[in-house]
Amino acid sequence: MATQARTIFIGGEWSAARSGASLDVRSPIDGEVFGAISRGEKSEIDHAVQAARAALAGPWSTMAGFERGRIMSRLSALILEQVEELAQLEARDTGKPITQARTDIRATARYFEFYAGAADKILGDVLPFLDGFQVTVQREPRGVCGLIIPWNYPASMFGRTIGPALATGNTVVLKPAEDASMSCTRLTALAHEAGVPVGVINLVTGLGEEAGAALSQHPDVDFLSFTGSPEVGTLIQTAAAKNHVPCVLELGGKSPQIVFDDADFDNAAKTIVGVITQNAGQTCSAGSRVLVQRSAYERFVALLAQKMSDVRVGAPQADLQCGPVINRTQQTKVQGFIERARAGGVEVIAQGSLDGSAVETGYFVTPTLFGPVPTDHELAQDEVFGPVLAVIPFEDEAEAVAIANGTAYGLVAGLWTENGARQMRVAKKLRVGQVFINNYGAGGGIELPFGGVKRSGHGREKGLEALKEYTVAKTIVLKHG
Ligand code: ADP
């Protein structure tokens, strides 16, 4: 029985769920319970949306952009002061190696820094029209934003969604993932301390099918942002359609890394293995397919195999390349992919190894490189969300593009070639939201617009592009004679 947690923050007050129910928080490192979160549901969501609506009419609505920016800068500074404490919490909650956790927390601070600078630069337009008229188009906040985020990068997703929402003058209700809410509770407290007015950020912890569903279906929410699985994405978009509100969906990918025979092999192999083992492969934009030109297949795959064999997996404090996956369900799911591929005769080219810090009760998975993988195999089509890499050979540029575009997803692509003309030619043919050439940022920097096409979702987060999603254009036509 979980102890009663008070992780719901509404209208500036912390509380338990009205039902009194809490959910245990288990660490993926050892499967042990180390905390609890409140199990908020419909009544807490109703209350939080009400608070967010009321705050829209409060000081937030009249505050100048630079003042909002100053509060956000303070939040960024507070996060930077507490990088270590927040990173330790994030590592415990998600299992990620401590260095990665620190990087994520710095990214969170960076989101608030970036969007603080944008808060007084939400520009409109003056349009040419008929003589005697003045037409302006101004960007206004959407209103109450419902934000539903996943467990893989909880802190940085807090910044990625709340940063642009606050910069543009919205108020929010955040529903973090039940598997990793701890850093979001700390960050919410810091936002309050930084001076974010009461009701502007509301946090409701709880289950997806309870609190998440209630938030997405709430008739008084003006905008939804969701990052998670395509299945839940469909539910969110259906709920948004019923309420006639817009939504941004980021739903994962099966991103290709395309390696031509003229690539810098060392750099490519090192980066590709680094990206698929970062966060134990639980990254929407992880490059999980490696398309290798046949003329370089043996040479490149040998290098890739060596890098994969070098990967060591362990507890966050051992600070290796790869930690455990988030929970038992995810572990079973990823291992299922590995076992089915083996049983079906797909060759294991190389595997990483578990370090002594990886205990039996933790949710560890051995990173695995498979190949050649047929293009219609599930490893070539489905998102594994674990440290599993599928190698697929191709003959020429046309075939590389066809295979790269030949899945239901379209989030990111990596392109590895020294041929300058080919770089742009291929990049333009890829149906994805981001292309990295001779590097791979796994989602990239805070400044870079990010989002997908097809099953990977729609809308753009990050960068200045996100500001368009969190605002709506109002056209004002003045006849002055
Ligand atoms: P994953 O498969 O990565 O766990 P999910 O799509 O299940 O991804 O979860 C992402 C986020 O969506 C989490 O915050 C989760 O609680 C929430 N969620 C899950 N189910 C629903 C639902 N039916 N309605 C709204 N939110 C949901």
Image (cartoon, grey):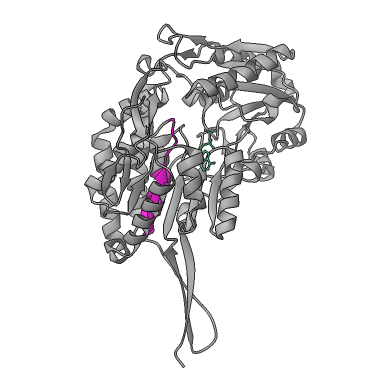
Furthest residue in direction top, as rendered = 356
Quadrant containing the N terminus is top left
Residue extending farthest to the bottom is 481
Nearer to us in this view, 480 or 196: 196
Q: State how many labels appear.
A: 0
> On the image, which quarter does residue 345 sit in?
top right
Relative to 344, residue 427 above or below: below
**Left or right: where 236 falls relative to 108:** right
- Where does residue 307 sit, x and y in percent of width and height? 54, 15
Residue 305 on image: x %, y %:
60, 13
| Furthest residue toward front | 19
Along the horizontal axis of the image, is 2 left or right of 236? left
User: Does residue 109 show up magenta in the picture?
Assistant: no
Instruction: Residue at 27%, 42% (x, y): give it.
Output: 189
Residue nearest the observer in this picture, 263 or 436: 436
Q: Verify whether residue 173 appears in magenta.
A: yes
> Residue sitting at 37 percent across and 34 percent down?
21
Q: Which residue is rendered at x = 65% and y = 14% of the image?
A: 339
Which sits in the foreground, 240 or 367?
240
The residue that appears at 64% across and 20% down in the rendered structure is 337
Using the rendered image of the protein, determine whether residue 463 is visible from the camera's viewpoint. Answer: no
Q: Which residues are magenta?
A: 159-179
Q: Is residue 14 left or right of residue 94?
A: left
Measured as percent of width and height from the top left, residue 249 is found at: 55, 46
Residue 23 visible? The answer is yes
The residue closer to the viewer here, 404 or 160, is 160
The x, y position of residue 172, in whole percent, is 39, 52
